Amino acid sequence: MPGIRAPSNYSEEPSRHPSLKINAKEPFNAEPPRQALVSSYVTPTEFFYKRNHGPIPVVDDIGRYCVSVKGLIEKPKELFMKDILNLPKYNVTATLQCAGNRRTAMSKTRTVRGVGWDISALGNDPFGTNILREELMLLSHNISEEEPVSLPFLSSPGVMVTAIWGGAKLSDVLELVGIPKSTSTTPAGGKHVEFVSIDRCKEEKGGPYKASIPLSQATNPEADVLLAYEMNGETLNRDHGYPLRVVVPGVIGARSVKWLDSINIDSKECQGFFMQKDYKTFPPSVNWDNIDWSTRRPQMDFPVQSAICSLEDMNIGTNGKIAIKGYAVSGGGRGIERVDISVDGGKTWIEASRYQKPGIKYIADEERSDKWAWVLFEAEADIHSNTEIVAKAVDTAANVQPEKVEDIWNLRGILNTSWHRVHVQVRHSSL
């Protein structure tokens, strides 16, 4: 595409923050330390997790960069950045979460395949380069051919972060090509909106990364789907999609395509690898010998999730009070009704306080809260002996996290929303 290109190697990668925990170097996949997640409601850009499938695209001439909108529509059009910037700008606070968040904990139950994300689709990798074999296997993503990979167990919650995204609503963009708001089908039969990236990846046999959402979602102004050019009040950086990316709130991060090349209106959902042969949930009975990808729909909304971020697994603390902090979020714009904390492995529970804005009690409604964003939680408890601390969240539709990871195990290790657990060892001070 004029103005932007996908490099053939990794010689032009951007610089990254040194505190990021690297899960793979090429392509670069990394997450922040878990405690960085709860240091602020909006995640600083440098601590945002990095999820890539190839070398980071390079913009050579922003004036020549454009996005083509085509397919089953009456008025195909090429949109330059000036056209996007002329549309009304919206700021949407939204949490993005990789579907593989907390995959490492699921891998402890049985072997899974995928990048070893912690709780932050933020990774805490004490094994360092010892997972090189796993990285190489996982990055090939030839899922039908590769051998199962068992990942190191990490209990952290790393691939989830929150930002203020600035850009044009996709519903406004689609009006420029003759698609009115709240449209579910175009006169020519278009029902899906496919986003195609400049990014090239092995999974697509050297073709572009792509994904889609229903047209009804894309044309709904209340869905807040953006073509974003800003992140936390600044121009997008290269790692996060400069110059233009899609942000689909409430949906797994795989649908928020970066480095946008084209938008296609089609009669069926995207047939790309990441829609049809990845990011689908299967029951524990399905393995690589009997899997049939066509029997499951692509995952869209992410389920209710919570994680403890202030404590590492096998944390050593002193006898007495302990602060328990973390995040909770649910997909589809559903708020968090409550977060329950147990300091005895789930026998008894206390309710944590929740907030989005510091010092302001969280109320799960759209008028007084950011419906697409996480809540942070805090609780304090007395700890007098070695124990297991547990967090579970309930959303406004009464969806609750399942107790056991074994019940939701799947061969790709996605959507681990089981109770989050950390083990604490108490050190008694001697007088």
Image: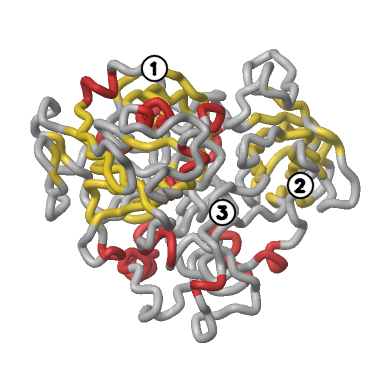
Q: Residues within 10 Å of mark 1 (few under 14, many from 20)?
A: some
Q: Position of residue 337 (x, y in %)?
A: 78, 34
Tell me the amino acid under the disc marked 1. Answer: Lys
Which residue does the numbered mark 2 point to in the structure image? 399
Residue at x 87%, y 42% (from the top left corner)? 349
Q: Mark 2 and mark 3: span between their CA atoms?
A: 19 Å
Evaluate if marks 1 and 2 touch, with contact meaning CB atoms under 8 Å apart: no
Instruction: State which quarter of the image contains the N terminus.
Output: top left
User: Which residue in the rendered view is the most extreme toward the top?
Assistant: 359
Tag 2: Cα neighbours inside 10 Å, few (<14), some, or many (≥20)?
A: some
Distance between the alpha carbons at the discs numbered 1 and 2: 33 Å
- Of residues 129 and 209, which is closer to you in this image? 209
**Label located before the other in sequence (3 or 1):** 1
First-in-chain label (2 vs 3): 3
- Pick the residue in front: 7 or 346: 7
Q: Nearer the viewer, mark 2 or mark 3?
A: 2
